[in-house]
Image (cartoon, rainbow, N blue to C red):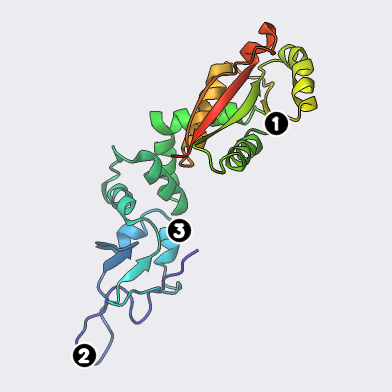
Amino acid sequence: MMNLTLGPRSLRPHRASPPAGPQVVSPVVELNVGGVLYTTTVSTLRKVPGSKLAEMFSSSAKACLDAEGRFFIDRPGAYFGPILDYLRSEQLPTQHIPEVYREAQFYEIKPLVKLLEDTPQIFGEQVARKQFLLRVPAYSENLELMVRLARAEAVASRSSAVLVCVVRTEEEAAQCADALRSFEYEKKSVVKFGPWKAAPQVKDLLDCVKMDIAAQGYQVHYEHYSDKTLRAKYLNYFYTFLFIWW
């Protein structure tokens, strides 16, 4: 957490020597947020009691200043503007909502976080998709395994393939047990997803896997696994994820 002091140099002091007697401190604050400059007031930054911003600009906090004497916050500056707009006039952002949501969480501006969670973008991700994925056993671990397998096969290759088995129910898992043992006997790695207890179907899970791997910067797509030795009854459960490297 960053500490900012409103001490003797607080709130952008006058450059001329102050007159004798009590110092008059300006309520105007100049901020450098990740290299982007903002001007606002202390009352705006303290608008939400208990937030990290209010704490940063409390009288007991310690300052982090840039070379020009502006308060420095080491966060993405592009998304701080919508934070200020909300604090000034309760205006909600219309663009870059996931990024602003992340910053609102960091600054612990709980009213804004709650409002953003009601937007379609955040509601769909946090309440629908992520809640589904929490019901898929070892989802995150399987994504990491897929990436490791793909990278291991990428040496001197333009692409690499990862074999995935997706079963939605316990019955489907039992049906695929023989096929999985066969792949294990052949020393072929298979990443298995499921079963899960939620409404989404196999294609929904596959789309989530593709989306989350692509979000890491990989170029990837999936297709049905094709192998003449695999019995037809198993074909709907096995897929190939193809990673393209160049």
User: Viewer-proximal residue, 129 or 147?
Assistant: 147
Measured along the vertical axis of the image, is residue 227 above or below residue 240?
above
Measured along the vertical axis of the image, is residue 86 above or below residue 35?
above
Instruction: Name the residue tied to disc 2.
Output: 19
Mark earlier in primary sequence (1, 3):
3
Q: Can residue 200 be seen here?
A: no
Circles 3, 2 touching at the beta carbon (< 8 Å): no
User: Viewer-proximal residue, 17 or 49?
Assistant: 17
Amino acid of disc 2: Pro
Instruction: Name the residue tied to disc 1.
Output: 189
Disc 3 versus disc 2: distance between alpha carbons? 34 Å
User: Viewer-proximal residue, 163 or 118?
Assistant: 163
Residue at horizontal 56 percent and vertical 40 percent from the top: 154
176 left or right, relative to 73:
right
x%, y% of residue 172? 71, 13
Quadrant in the picture for residue 51: bottom left
Question: Which-is-in-front pick, marks 3 and 2?
Answer: 3
Amino acid of disc 1: Ser
Q: Residue furthest front?
A: 156
Q: Residue furthest bottom?
A: 20
Residue at horizontal 41 percent and vertical 50 percent from the top: 103
Amino acid of disc 3: Lys
Question: Which-is-in-front pick, marks 1 and 3?
Answer: 1
